[in-house]
Amino acid sequence: MELKTLNEVEINLVTSSKINQVDFENLTFGNIFTDHMLVCDYKNGAWQMPSIVPYAPFMIDPSAKVFHYGQAIFEGMKAYKDQQDAVWLFRPDENYKRFNKSATRMAMPEVPETVFLGGLKKLLEVDREWVRKGKGNTLYIRPFMIATGHGVIAAPSQEYRFMIILSPAKSYYSGEVKVLIAEHYSRAANGGIGAAKAAGNYSAQFYPTKLANEQGFQQIIWTDDATHTKLEEAGTMNVFFRINDTLLTAPTSERILDGVTRKSVIELAKRENIDVEVRSVLVDELVEAAKNGSLKEIFGAGTAAVINPIVGFSYLGTYYELPKLENAIALEIKEKLTNIQYKLADDTFGWTVKI
Ligand code: COI
């Protein structure tokens, strides 16, 4: 695909870049931001002219609905630099479509493609030095929209702000990831907002995840809210289970985010003739497979997390450790996926888009 161009944009550049103060080898995920950001306001029923301005705090009315009712959505994307210094995006159209789906679910206005993708292209052109060469280096892209309208009446805002900020990133998790299978708390329910990338979906996980962290687990694998018997997603990533030589992952639903990395893993695995089943995976099935040795791998898949192996899981107080494999599918898929993203392998799927 070709990214649309944003013709109408106001640009106000920094007088001096802070790039030389950044230690790109030692980045904590999502902690450092580039010199510029994109801002576009919605008022009087229309999107206004976007601007690219120096990254900085901004003023917002204390009664803005984002503060009181959490009317806020976001996306997660990445930019990669190839050997020839060209900057690439990975399936940006998927993020754009999902963003507007989230907007509809949260009673927010859709953002035009010229603003979302055209604006992103412009912003990346301005801050392209921040996309570092070399596998493992990425520029994490965070488009988001908040309700800025004045007044605490519990109704959708009439005003919104769409923004894009950029953060140089390496890995999301440092160290091993152990997970807890949810027994009581739920991430999402049918008819709710689980499939939207709504801010509240993430903050609602903070408390149960804090409890899990205190027990030595980095993440929770959420189960369905009605029965807590089906494995769903991990909140920061979708999850895959390898039983014998079959990869299993839950189908997307009203409760599960339709992850771009998730769907790419499924397509890549199929191309590699790996057996993939998209179906409900039961907690009992996982425990049984862990006990009889047929459970070989669990891994997470997400933009920030990329492909992250999980070393073990706990359920009802018992910890099950996974085998350490030489030929893990997670690593094979990660290699194939990142080679496409960094343009080190042919992109036969047509997923990569040049800036
Ligand atoms: C992403 O993977 O981009 C996400 O949005 C997950 C977030 C928790 C970092």
Image: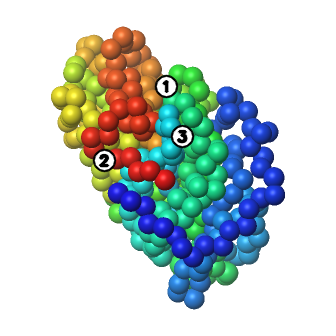
Give the residue at x 59% y 27%. Answer: 174
Quadrant containing the N terminus in the rendered view: bottom left
Q: Residues within 10 Å of mark 1 (few under 14, many from 20)?
A: many
Residue behind mark 3: 85
Say what secondary structure mark 1 lies in. Answer: strand
Name the amino acid type tagged 1: Lys
Q: Residues within 10 Å of mark 2 (few under 14, many from 20)?
A: few
Task: Tell me, yes or no, if residue 297 can be seen here.
Answer: no
How far apart are the alpha carbons under marks 2 and 3?
Answer: 19 Å
Mark 2 or mark 1, earlier in chain = 1
Give the residue at x 63% y 64%. Answer: 38
Q: Nearer the viewer, residue 39 or 329?
A: 39
Say what secondary structure mark 3 lies in. Answer: loop
Q: In x, y percent, where is residue 314?
A: 44, 25
Mark 3 or mark 1, earlier in chain = 3
Mark 2 or mark 3, earlier in chain = 3
Tags 2 and 3 in contact by the CB under 8 Å rule?
A: no
How far apart are the alpha carbons under marks 2 and 1?
Answer: 34 Å
The quadrant where residue 309 appears: top left
- Report the side of 15 relative to 295 (left or right): right
Residue behind mark 1: 178
- Report the side of 327 relative to 90 (left or right): left
Q: In x, y percent, where is residue 321?
A: 41, 16
The quadrant where residue 137 appears: top right
Q: Classify 306 as above or below 94.
A: above
Give the residue at x 74% y 75%. Answer: 61
Name the amino acid type tagged 3: Asp
- Report the side of 89 relative to 164 (left or right): left
Tell me the tag on residue 233. Answer: none
Dot in front, 2 or 1: 2
Tags 2 and 1 in contact by the CB under 8 Å rule?
A: no
Residue behind mark 2: 350
